[in-house]
Image: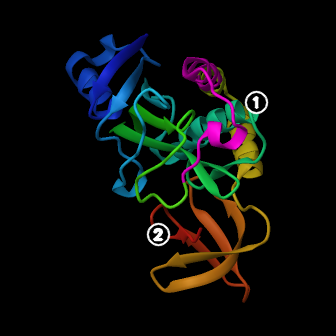
Amino acid sequence: MNIQLTETASTNRYLTQLCDEKGDAVAELTTVTAVSQTAGRGQRGAGWESEPGKNLTFSFVLYPAFLEVRRQFLLSQLVALSVKEELDAYTDGISVKWPNDIYWQEKKICGILIEHHLCGSVIGRSIVGIGLNINQEHFRSDAPNPVSLRQITGRTYDCSLLLTGIMNRVEACYNALRADTSGGQASCVAQHSAEALFRRDGYHRYADAGGVFTARLLRVDADGRFVLETEAGETRSYLFKEVQYLI
């Protein structure tokens, strides 16, 4: 089901409230889109700028009770890959910036925010929010490096077609993961995610609680830990928000 709103504060907030009120009556993969989102949120509590009618701002719900809480990073990988692979059909240079932003070269084209509701040792519900810059030509916020598909290619796009493409990819990969009994699909998602990572080669600058340093990416662990190796050969492992790329 697709719920289309002219304006809302946040599609994540709208869908969360709907699920809280109606429970399982809200079907899995129900999607809420908004022409204008007035209080969209990104990671680290940042706002998300989106000119009304020019981009995709949407959220959808999953009920991944087949996934243990310790495997929740798989959902981040699955969603990010679905967006990346859809954008690959339109341009080159797309990558996944850990944990789940989408970049074109050194600029951010898409932000993803996933909010989980846990039921004991499993994930009872996940609300996935996506902001994808498509046709916006000028950005006025203080975000350091936004870019849109139109700025990259000079062309105008039908947002609904990209939405359909992304959701078809999400649904196919999600259903394959749910049906997976051997672990093969999870391994495939992890492998493709590793191959898609932003700045996966060479040394780059990062910052953590101890300051700025230069390191190369070793791997991303199954629990989402970001593992770097400094120029001095020291291995450092980080959870989300413990380290930042310096763009």
Camera sees residue 121: no
* Residue, far left: 21
Comes first in the chain, label 2 or label 1: 1
The residue at which mark 2 appears reads as: 242
Residue range corresponding to the magenta coloring:
146-170
> Mark 2 to mark 1: distance in Å?
33 Å
User: Does 117 lie within the magenta span?
Assistant: no
Q: Main secondary structure of the magenta part?
A: helix
Residue 14 versus residue 69 in the image, above or below: above
Q: What residue appears at the point 77 percent right and 50 percent down from the top-left corner?
A: 195
Name the spot of residue 199 as percent of width and height, x first: 72, 62
Residue 174 versus residue 118 in the image, above or below: above
Q: Which of the two marks, 2 or 1, is nearer to us in this view?
A: 1
Q: What residue appears at the point 64 percent right and 42 percent down from the top-left corner?
A: 151
User: Does 150 lie within the magenta span?
Assistant: yes
Do the CB atoms of the residues marked 2 and 1 lie less than 8 Å apart?
Answer: no
The kind of secondary structure element at disc 1 is: loop
Residue 218 versus residue 197 in the image, above or below: below
Name the spot of residue 76 as percent of width and height, x first: 55, 42
The residue at which mark 1 appears reads as: 89
* Residue, far bottom: 232
